[in-house]
Image: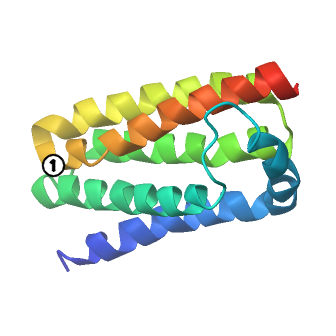
């Protein structure tokens, strides 16, 4: 039973990420050629690889926290909030192509990730460290999002 969260939470995070990308699949495919022309844009194939790893790390991190503090309400709430904000970013950016709104939404996500790291750290330093790549990727995504606003809007 103690190992179940290490399976279910990463699957939950992956499922939310998959659903978000599934909902905007057509718009994402249409927009990717323009996005690949932005400054410092990585190859398109990198995005699903990186996001898969990040979603797995999100789930593992929360499982680590819950393994040390099973009745933790605050970490679960923050984790769920950042995952929800993450979900809606794709709908704003790809679905609606609201580049400025999605950039502001991404700032909220960045702050939630930072909060999650600070809440996880006293409970499980490893869980907090596993979120650093996520914070760095969202920082880079912010640059790309701002570039899309400046060059594509």
23 relative position to 123: left or right:
right
In the image: residue 113, left or right of residue 69? right
Find residue 143 and report its image quarter: top right
Q: Quadrant of residue 105?
A: top right
Q: Can you identify the residue that label 1 sits on? A: 126
Q: Horizontal and vertical percent for residue 69?
A: 14, 52
The location of residue 122, given as percent across then percent down, is 11, 36
Front residue of this view, candidates 153 and 107: 153
Q: Is residue 125 above or below residue 1?
A: above
Is residue 48 placed above or below 36 in the rendered structure?
below
Tell which of 95 and 33 is nearer to you: 33
Residue at 66%, 55% (x, y): give it: 44
Horizontal side of residue 150 vs 103, given as left or right: right
Q: How is the image coloured?
A: rainbow
Q: What element does badge 1 sit on?
A: helix
Location of the N terminus (image quadrant): bottom left
Residue in the picture at 39% in, 67% down: 10
- Which percent across, then down, holds residue 106? 59, 30
Question: Residue 129 lies in what quarter of the image?
Answer: top left
Q: Residue at x 79, y 19 (%)?
A: 150
Q: Residues within 10 Å of mark 1 (few under 14, many from 20)?
A: some
Number of numbered labels in the structure image: 1
User: Is residue 124 at all visible to an observer of this figure?
Assistant: no
Q: Give the position of the C terminus as an image quadrant.
A: top right
Query: Would you place residue 19 above or below residue 147 in this image?
Result: below
Asked if 37 appears above or below 62 in the picture, the reply is above
Residue at the image point whose x is 20% and y is 52% from the top: 65
Q: Position of residue 70 (x, y in %)?
A: 18, 57
């Amino acid at each position: 039973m103690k190992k179940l969260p290490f399976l279910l939470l990463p699957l939950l995070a992956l499922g939310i990420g998959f659903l978000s990308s599934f909902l905007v699949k057509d718009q994402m495919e249409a927009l990717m050629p323009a996005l690949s022309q932005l400054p410092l844009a990585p190859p398109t194939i990198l995005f699903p690889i990186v996001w898969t790893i990040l979603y797995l790390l999100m789930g593992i991190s929360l499982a680590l926290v819950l393994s040390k503090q099973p009745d933790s309400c605050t970490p679960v709430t923050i984790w769920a909030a950042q995952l929800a904000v993450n979900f809606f970013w794709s709908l704003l950016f790809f679905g609606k192509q609201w580049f400025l709104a999605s950039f502001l939404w991404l700032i909220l996500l960045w702050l939630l990730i930072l909060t999650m790291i600070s809440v996880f750290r006293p409970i499980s330093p490893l869980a907090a460290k596993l979120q650093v790549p996520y914070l760095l990727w969202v920082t880079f995504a912010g640059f790309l999002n701002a570039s899309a606003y400046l060059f594509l809007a």
